[in-house]
Amino acid sequence: MTKSVPRKTSSRSAVQEVLDRAVSESGLPGMVAEVQDGAGRWFGAAGVADTVTGRARLPQEQFRIGSTTKTFTATLLLQLAAEGRLGLDDTVEQWLPGLVRGNGNDGGGVTLRQLLGMTSGLFNYAQDESLTSRHYGPAFLEHRYDRFRPQELVEVAMSHAPDFAPGEGWTYSNTGYILSGLVIEKVTGRSYADELEQRIVRPLALTGTYLPGDGQYELRGPHTRLYSKNHLPAPDAEIHDVTELNASFAWTAGGMVSTVGDLNRFFGALLGGLLLPPAQQEEMFTVFPTPEGKWIPHTSYGLAVASVELSSGERVWGMGGAFTGSFCYTYGTRDGGHLVSQSLNGDWSDPIGLFTEVLEAEFARGGSV
C-alpha cells in the first residue's frame, strides 16, 4: 500500500474552477462535487440540472452511478463471506450450476474472487455486438426501455469464448458482477435490492440510494436530468434527454442510483472499516496495477475498488461509474476521512480528465482555501 503524502488545506477555488470550465469549455450541462472531511461538507456546482428550465444542480439530486454499483455488490458478497455463508474460493458452478458453460467457458473453474477482481476471463456481455448496436448510437433511443433478465446477459457472454483462462489475465467485465448479483440472491433467498436496503442503505441512512425495480424508468426522488449524445463523436451531435430508461441492462454491475452525499457516506464507511471485518477489508483493498491500455491510467484495482496515484504522489481510493447520460467518481483517503464525490449529467467530453483535475486540486499539497 502506498503511504499517503501529508497535505495542506486544499484549494476549493481550484475545484470550483474545474466545475465552471466543464460547463463553459466542454459544453456539459452541469457538474457538481461534494467534499467531506474533518471540517464538514463543501458543495460546489456549475451549470444546470435541467436545460429546459435552467434549474441549478443541487446536493440532494439523484443520478445513475453506473459501475460504482460494483462496489456495493462486492461489499454485499464480502459480507456474506464474513458470515461464512460462502467462500471467495467457491466456484460459480457451486452456486449457479450450469449457467457458465459452452464455448470454452466453465463455471467450475471460475471463483467468486475472480468475478470481483476482473480476473475470471469471462467475456464482457456489454461488448457483444448485438447489444452494443442497440445501446450505443441512434438506436439507443428506440431500445432505451428494453428489459433484460440477468440470465439473458450471462447467456450473451456465454455465446463468446473467454478472453483468457481464469486467473491468467485482467480485463474489465460486467459479466462477473451480474453473476455476483445472482449468487447473492441464491445464497440469501432474497432479492439483491432487499439485501442492499437491509445491509447498506438503511444502516447508513442513504436516502437517495437504490436499485431501480423492473419497469421503474424514472428516478424516484429529486434528480438531475441526464443528457447524452449517444456516443456519436461529432462535436455538434444532437443532445438527448435520456433520464428515463430501463437500467436492467446493467443490473448489479451498473444499474444503481445515488447522490453525491450518499456516495461519500458509503465510501467513508467502507474505507473506514465499518462495513467489513478486517479479513474481508484486506481482500477488497489488495490492489494490483491494471494492464496498460486496459483501463484508467495510473490505476490499480482490487475487488470493486480502485486506487489512483495523483501527480503529487497522493494515492486516493474509490470507484467511478458511467451510464447513459451520467458519469460519477468518488475517491478519497484510505481511512475514508477525506472524500470527494463528483457527478456530470452529460456523457461526452473527457470526464476522467475533469474528475482527475478535481482530485488534483482537492488533494494537492500546498494549496490554500
Image: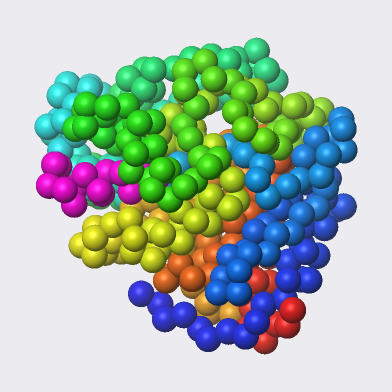
* Front residue of 366 and 84: 84
Residue 246 x/y as whole percent: 55, 21
- Residue 34 is covered by the magenta coloring: no
Whether residue 40 is visible, yes or no, is yes
Residue at (78%, 64%) from the top-left corner? 16
Whether residue 349 is visible, yes or no, is no
* Front residue of 36 and 355: 36
Viewport quadrant of the C terminus: bottom right
What is the span of residues highlighted in magenta in the rendered image? 72-90
Taking 214 as reference, is 1 left or right? left
Viewport quadrant of the N terminus: bottom left
Q: Quadrant of residue 160?
A: top left
Residue at (12%, 32%) from the top-left corner? 94
Residue at (50%, 27%) from the top-left corner? 212
* Front residue of 312 and 334: 334
* Front residue of 11 and 321: 11
Taking 67 as reference, is 19 left or right? right
Residue 159 x/y as whole percent: 33, 21
Residue 326 x/y as whole percent: 64, 39
Decide: is 188 above or below 304. above
Taking 128 as reference, is 30 left or right? right
- Residue 73 is covered by the magenta coloring: yes
Residue 4 x/y as whole percent: 46, 80
How many numbered discs? 0
Taking 164 as reference, is 45 left or right? right
Instruction: Identify the coloring.
Output: rainbow
Residue at (70%, 82%) from the top-left corner? 367
